[in-house]
Image (cartoon, grey):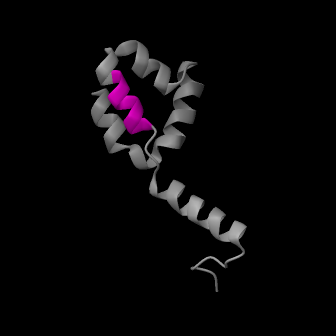
């Protein structure tokens, strides 16, 4: 069901959210909140907003560039 999809596809969640809204005309978070009870909906929305590995590397790269340090993977 919905919870399995949220967990299974978390790594591609930003793209899924974009496409979901384009296809259905409302956000995935809105669907979760309207189609689930309060506690379960809160859990799924929390899972939806957990940073992905891409978010982490983007944040690290941003902090490296703002601190004047060269990113670790630079050649």
Please provide percent x and percent y for residue 72: 57, 79
Q: Quick one: quadrant of the N terminus?
A: top left
Q: Residue at x 43, y 44 (%)?
A: 50
Please provide percent x and percent y for residue 53: 46, 58
Left or right relative to 53: residue 74: right
Left or right relative to 51: residue 2: left
Magenta-colored stretch includes residue 20 = no
Q: Residue at x 42, y 50 (%)?
A: 11
Q: Residue at x 34, y 16 (%)?
A: 38
Magenta-colored stretch includes residue 44 = yes
Please provide percent x and percent y for residue 60: 57, 65
Q: Quick one: quadrant of the C terminus?
A: bottom right
Left or right relative to 74: residue 8: left
Residue 23, quarter of the rendered image: top right
- Count the marks: 0
Please state which of residues 26 and 52 is positioned toward the viewer in this rendering: 52
Residue span colored magenta: 41-48
Residue sitting at the far bottom: 75
Residue sitting at the far front: 67
Q: Main secondary structure of the magenta part?
A: helix
Q: Residue at x 63, y 64 (%)?
A: 63
Residue 32, quarter of the rendered image: top left
């Amino acid at each position: 069901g919905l919870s399995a999809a949220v967990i299974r596809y978390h790594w591609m969640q930003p793209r899924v959210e974009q496409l979901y809204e384009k296809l259905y005309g409302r956000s995935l978070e809105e669907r979760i909140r309207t189609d689930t009870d309060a506690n379960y909906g809160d859990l799924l929305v929390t899972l939806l907003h957990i940073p992905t590995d891409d978010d982490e590397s983007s944040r690290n790269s941003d902090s490296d560039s703002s601190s004047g340090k060269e990113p670790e993977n630079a050649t």
